[in-house]
Amino acid sequence: MTRVEFHAKRPARTQRCQGRGCGPHGHRATSWQHWLPQQALRVYVSGLRLPESEARAVLRRLLADERNLSPFCHRFHLASRGGRELFTREMVPVSAWEFARELGEAYVARLERAYPMRRS
Ligand SMILES: [Zn+2]
């Protein structure tokens, strides 16, 4: 499938960073975090075996679905490129679980693996 880029419905910098420690009056977000990663959505859509134009439309819609997105500042964005250690299970919004459930149990499991429960 030809490359489909992610285009947010609204720019992240119009949002507040959702990171813990950034505070209720925290700084502006700089980017959107995909809870289910873009790659997982691409795999999902190619598995649907739709005609190309239809597949592109579905993928574009899934990439921009705000249920699977949260705005974060640069600090969190960098962490997502590295170890994700700043992201915890508690930070995954209810909407992202709902989004994953619509794609199937395998995607719920993927979210669970990506954001394991912390042992205290
Ligand atoms: Zn922040």
Image (tube, rainbow, N blue to C red):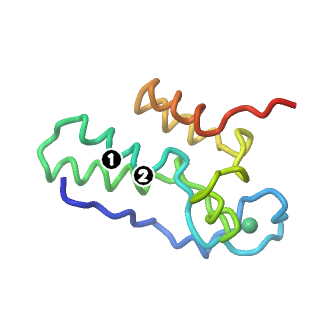
Q: Left of 27 or right of it: where is 4?
A: left
Q: Say which of 57 and 110 sits in front.
A: 110
As measured in the structure, the alpha-carbon distance from the residue carrying label 2 to the one carrying label 1 is 6 Å
| Residue furthest to the left | 51
The amino acid pointed to by label 1 is: Arg
Residue shown at 84% from the left, 61% from the top: 21
Q: Who's the residue at 48% across and 30% down the image? A: 101
Specify the label residue 38 is tagged with.
Answer: 2
Task: Indicate the secondary structure of the residue bearing disc 2.
Answer: helix
- 1 vs 87, left or right, is left
Q: Amino acid at mark 2?
A: Gln
Res. 113 image quadrant: top right
Q: Determine contact: label 2, label 1, CB under 8 Å.
A: yes
Q: Dot 2: within a 10 Å radius of its alpha carbon, few (fewer than 14), some, or many (20 or more) residues? A: some
Q: Which mark is residue 101?
A: none
Residue 4: image x %, image y %?
28, 60
Q: Is mark 2 within 8 Å of ligand 1?
A: no
The residue depicted at 28 percent of the width and 48 percent of the height is 58
Secondary element at tag 1: helix
Judged from this view, the residue extending furthest toward the front is 82
Pointer 1: what residue? 42
Residue under the point 49% across and 35% down: 100
Residue 87 position within the rendered picture, expressed as x and y whole percent measured from the top left: 70, 49
Graded by Cα atoms within 10 Å as few (under 14), some (14 to 19) or many (20 or more), the crowding at tag 1 reads many
> Eyeballing the image, is 7 above or below 13?
above
Horizontal side of 86 relative to 44 (left or right) equals right
Where does the image place residue 73, in percent across and percent down from the top left? Answer: 67, 69
| Residue 10 image point, x, y percent | 50, 69
